[in-house]
Image (cartoon, rainbow, N blue to C red):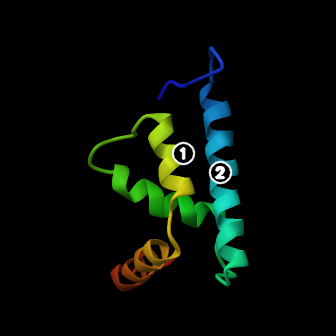
Amino acid sequence: MEAQAGGTELTDAELNRLIEELCESKAEELRLLGYDEVRGEDVWACVSEGYRKSGMPPLYRVVNDILSLKPSRFMNYITLSMYRGEGL
């Protein structure tokens, strides 16, 4: 995935760091709402589940998907993962 920020291309390492920071920010938000055990990795697993079939979307969509993740969608993902035996 290539992305540009202010006219400069981001490296894969920079993109990964950006995504990690966004996921950790969303996890912190969810923790403030009472979901104490949420980690950034859990947020990414939930968001990226939708990319399995279609592949990695453009950066703007990834950012939107992370920042707009609702607690109800996250809890549905966790519940289904537990039923499938994919414990987080």
At a point 35% along the width and 55% down the height, the residue shown is 50
Q: Which mark is residue 63?
A: 1
Picture quadrant of residue 4: top right
Counting residues from the start of the chain, the first of labels 1 and 2 encountered is: 2
Q: Give the x, y percent position of residue 51.
A: 36, 49
Question: Is the residue 5 above or below the residue 74 in the image?
Answer: above
> Label 2: how many residues lie within 10 Å, few (<14), some (14-19) or many (20+)?
some
Q: Position of residue 41 (x, y in %)?
A: 60, 61
Furthest residue toward top: 7
Q: Secondary structure at mark 2?
A: helix
Q: Is residue 42 left or right of residue 28?
A: left
Q: Is residue 22 above or below residue 17?
A: below
**Label 1: element kind:** helix
Task: Name the residue: 28% across, 44% down.
Answer: 54
Query: In the displayed structure, does residue 32 sit left or right of residue 79?
Result: right
Residue 52 x %, y %: 33, 51
Please, what is the three-letter code of the amino acid marked with disc 1? Val
Residue closer to the observer: 42 or 85:
42
Quick check: marks 1 and 2 in contact, CB under 8 Å?
yes
Instruction: Answer few, some or many: residues within 10 Å of disc 1's Cα (few below 14, many 20 plus, some between 14 and 19).
Output: some
Q: Which residue is mark 2?
A: 22
For badge 2, the amino acid type reads Leu
Gap between marks 1 and 2 measured at Cα:
7 Å
Number of numbered discs visible in the structure rendering: 2
Residue 48 vertical position relative to residue 14 in the rendered view, above or below:
below
Say the numbered circle drawn on residue 48: none
Q: Nearer the viewer, residue 45 or 68?
A: 68
Residue visible at 56% across and 63% down in the picture: 43
